[in-house]
Image (cartoon, helix red, strand yellow):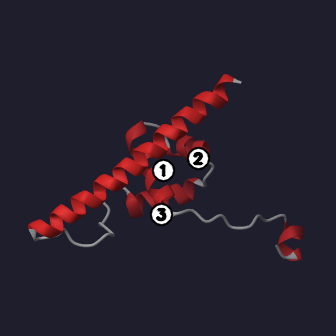
């Protein structure tokens, strides 16, 4: 951090992964919580959350490309999405267990 930033008290800019942004927006849209609550829960700026919702939320333009037309391409995409779902489900389960362990103390 430069001395100018230290003197002004500004913080370095945080970088968030696309996966993190999508998961926060998904949580916001499915939890029924306000944007302010979700922003505080995840430690992000409300303005970032609103930008992410425009970019990744329901009704947003798909960023991953067109829908496959051939049965082979569709099958391949389904297989890839199943792997991704299994990975994300495992991450979620680990986080749930971690929160349970941390809340016990």
Q: Please, what secondary structure does the residue beneath circle 2 have?
A: helix
How many angstroms separate mark 1 from mark 2 (CA)?
Answer: 8 Å
Q: Please, what secondary structure does the residue beneath circle 3 have?
A: helix
Along the polypeptide, which appears first: circle 1 or circle 2?
1
- Does residue 11 appear to the left or right of 52 in the view shown? right
**Which residue is pictured at 84% across the width and 76% down the height?**
2
**Which residue is pictured at 60% across the width and 53% down the height?**
44
Along the polypeptide, which appears first: circle 1 or circle 3?
3
Q: Which residue is mark 2?
A: 42
- Whether pointer 2 and pointer 3 mark residues with C-beta atoms closer than 8 Å, the reply is no
Q: Which residue is mark 3?
A: 18
How many angstroms separate mark 2 from mark 3 (CA)?
Answer: 14 Å
Q: Please, what secondary structure does the residue beneath circle 1 have?
A: helix
**Which residue is pictured at 30% across the width and 66% down the height?**
62
**Which residue is pictured at 29% across the width and 53% down the height?**
82
Q: Indicate the position of residue 46 as horizontal and vertical percent values.
A: 56, 53
Q: Indicate the position of residue 97 as horizontal and vertical percent values.
A: 55, 33
Q: Which residue is mark 1?
A: 24
Specify the label residue 105 is tagged with.
none
Above or below, 97 against 57 in this view is above
**In terms of depth relative to the viewer, which is nearer, 6 or 91?**
91
Classify 10 Å Cα crowding around label 2: few (below 14), some (14-19), many (20 and above): few
- Does residue 70 appear to the left or right of 95 in the view shown? left
- Whether pointer 1 and pointer 2 mark residues with C-beta atoms closer than 8 Å, the reply is yes
Residue 58 makes an appearance in the image:
no
Q: Indicate the position of residue 17 as horizontal and vertical percent values.
A: 53, 63
Q: How many marks?
A: 3
């Amino acid at each position: 951090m430069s001395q100018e930033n230290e003197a002004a008290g500004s913080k370095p800019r945080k970088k968030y992964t696309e996966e993190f942004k999508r998961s926060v927006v998904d949580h916001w849209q499915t939890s029924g919580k306000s944007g302010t609550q979700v922003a505080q829960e995840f430690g992000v700026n409300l303005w970032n959350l609103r930008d992410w919702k425009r970019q990744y939320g329901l009704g947003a333009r798909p960023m991953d490309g067109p829908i496959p037309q051939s049965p082979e391409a569709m099958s391949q995409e389904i297989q890839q999405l199943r792997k991704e779902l299994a990975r994300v489900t495992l991450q979620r389960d680990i986080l749930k267990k971690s929160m349970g362990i941390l809340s016990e103390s």
